[in-house]
Image (cartoon, rainbow, N blue to C red):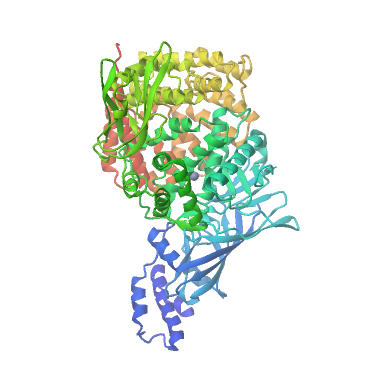
Amino acid sequence: MGTLLKFNSSKKKILVASTFLATLLLNACVTTNNDLNAPNDSNKIVSQTATFTPRAENQYLSQEQAFKRSARVSNVSYKLNYKLTGDEHFSASSTINFTLSDNAFPLTVDLNKAQITSVVINGFSMPAEQLEINYNQWFITLPVAQLLKGNNTVTVDFTRKHNTNGEGLHRFKDPVDDKVYLYSHFEPAAAQQMFALFDQPDLKATFEMTVSAPQEWTVISATKEDKIIKQGNVNVWHFPQSKTLSPYNFSLHAGPYKMWQDNSGKYPLRLFTRQSVANQITPKHWFTYTNQGFEFFDDYFGIDYPFKKYDQVLVPDFLYGAMENAAAVTFAEGSFLTNGEMSQSRRERLASVIMHEMAHQWFGNLATMKWWNGLWLNESFAAFMATLATSEATEFTNAWRTFYAGGKQSAYRADQRVTTHPIEVPVPSTANAFDNIDAITYSKGASVLNQLRHLLGEKTFQQGIHNYLSNNAYKNAVLDDFIDSLAKASGKDLTLWQQKWLYQAGVNTIEASYQCDAGKINSFQLLQTADASQPTLREQKVQIALFKAKSSGFDLIKKVSVIYQGKSTKVNELIGLACPDLVYPNYQDWAFVKVNLDARSFKTTQNYLAQIEDPLLRSMLWQSLWDSVRDGKLPLNEYLQVALANAPFEQDYTTLGQILGQISSANIYLNKGLGSQHNYVKGIAQQLEEITWQSTLYNSDNKNIQRRWFNSYLKFAHTDSALDNLYKLLNGQHSLEGLTISQDVRWDIIAQLSRFQHAKSAELIVQELTVDSSDTGVKSALYAQVIAPNVKVKNDWLAKIQQKNSDIGFSKLRTAMSALYPSEQNNLREQSATQLMSSLTEIDKANGPVFMRSYNNLIPATCSETSVSRLATAVSELTQLSAGTKRSLLIKQQEDQRCLLIKNKMTLSN
Ligand SMILES: [Zn+2]
């Protein structure tokens, strides 16, 4: 192979040339022609060499290259060996066994930014000079000469720095006790930051692993360890071979984690947290929901949980909510740790996220997408299943209402934006894997699956899912496999359904159109419309419900289920019934569709909202009012009049959360549109402060409702007297019946005092840090500091955020970004607007999509003509932006126009 090094031009050229020569060399052996310089007469080799396209030299993998690789490689297994010390670097050895269908071309193995000490291919050790050429910091190119047709073994030894950005093998040093914790996160393609591999979902493999770690550490992976051997002052853990997994589903977590166990259910469960936050979780909640989930899923899927044991690990600095690593799921600490008792809404969220990750163990980990264009189905299905399981297997029978008020609304909003996209879209490369992972893929997808369940019938749907999972167990599958399973189970052709729902974007609107004569309905039809930009009309099954007012509340006169399609669908069944006061055409929320209330129903809603007894219907009617504001049909001030009068009577905590969320958005529109000093805005702010405080006091006998109101008060308190009230709650001069002021609440109070410039706030931040110096404490202090309306502090932090290669951890920068500009500081945001816009292209170029997802929230949209035109200019002039940032910019532009529309629609007397 020495001859290969004679070439002295650019690396790339050498690589291509070496490939060609190596091909000749190998062929030469077969044909016993030893003269390397002799022209080779094999047309096959010439044509193969001609079609060989080397992989782009960057960190991403294109779908084309991935499929070329998986067409040649099969039967992959990994043997991994780690030496973990807790230091900033780790050392490892990664042995890959695989079958290669041909050795005509080189083959690449992914390994990101490692210091490689050796590469051995089928017993041949790659010389250092060649390694320098064949490793570009993203992947190693294995030359043809050393590859075999058939079985191959490649071993890569390396050291690498741990990541601190939440990917690969992340390292976190606890500021409280200096203990070091590691966890892995691989999706979509970050396994290559931990070992050498074929990093793509359709090259499933088995994993066997040995880990040397300090004695006080616990090591967690896809299988349970079968041996721990003490060697000097370390323990060596052995993990037996796993089931066949996509690499992104494998994991390794290690550190002095605190552990709880539960063996009361069908599978052994363990739960882990850092030592310093161990008192902030209630393991009982975790184990209860998890056991309930396993019972539900084993039964629903008709397939037993495939991975034998189930570990759940809470980890710091996590980029997402949770990750479904096979049998070793990770959860973001932030969402699930709590000082004091966990509120009902947080427990419900916990149950739902546990169910989501558990659903993935079958749908995603057992049967896996072939490529990242299938990620939406993975997420949609898990989101759908999580809601179903939470509502049917846990105490949270309201889960579908929570989904309606939360995820589904974000899907409707996203689907009405200029940036909407079909549920399924092509993903050309791993760089784009998360481009479209948003409310469309999670929540619209989940809603559409739920609609399909109603259309096909519960049992048929379940049978289709079972067939899909059992046919594709331990394999990869594509959308057509899923649709075929459901089509076969139901005997229906779903081609058109698939076309209209999955490949075309946009949400339709339905409205009941009816006439009454002599108090009776004499015609009734359901009208369907589509936005001009997304003209597809669809078929769905809905329930139409008719209500009549009684002395207090409403009677349901009739509900009928109807499959509608096209522009107009007659519903003759309703003719002759008493003329209703309220018609709701998507009763019980089967469909993914916007509802336009008819004029009479809209009036009824405005006047009698609090009297609607059915909580889901009430929630949907609240939504109709709020949608009318956002669409510029109902003046914001009229909405607020209804909302402030009715909200205090709401006793359903899910609906109350939804209403308070709408009110909070209304307040943002006011602050941005009219300014916090406008008389009307000041009046509303004052009312919000009073109503939220009075309702906190009034609901002392209902903890969950009280918590909701108090959390809102924590955001609306702004007058001197309210800030003084907060201050006294903090130092114990005031107390509240039913409410404990936990460490989390203490920080919330301090942030609010700082936000409205309470004289003691700076002092309080410093003082509180001496009590709570935890990771959360440090971030909360930072949040409180940055949210103050202090230009210097803001500019300092903006500079730190924009600095290239900042040594401040990303999780801190992210906290600072979230605190920079609350809506009442709209003028401060405006002051930095030009700078933010002019530097956007440069920042976008210097940072990856994870950073930009947070950063793009800073793009200024200040609800004025100036701001709208500034965004329009940016859209047309900043042509070099990444896809994600371009999309954020378009969303900002559209939402800023909406803010202006809402502002101009208001009917204020002064
Ligand atoms: Zn998921």
Quadrant location, the C terminus: top left
Residue at the image position 35 percent from the left and 46 percent from the top = 502
Above or below residue 107? Residue 813 is above
- Most foreground residue, 388 or 784: 388
In which quarter of the view is residue 282 placed?
top right
Residue 86 showing in the rendered view: no
Residue at the image position 37 percent from the left and 29 percent from the top = 560
- Most foreground residue, 65 or 262: 262
- How far across and down, in percent of the image, does residue 357 sit? 54, 44
- Most foreground residue, 62 or 832: 62
Above or below residue 306? Residue 832 is above
Residue 275 showing in the rendered view: yes
- How far across and down, in percent of the image, does residue 718 sit? 48, 17
Above or below residue 191? Residue 536 is above
In the picture provided, is 270 more to the left or to the right than 376? right
- How far across and down, in percent of the image, does residue 172 sit? 60, 45
Above or below residue 143? Residue 800 is above
In which quarter of the view is residue 658 placed?
top left
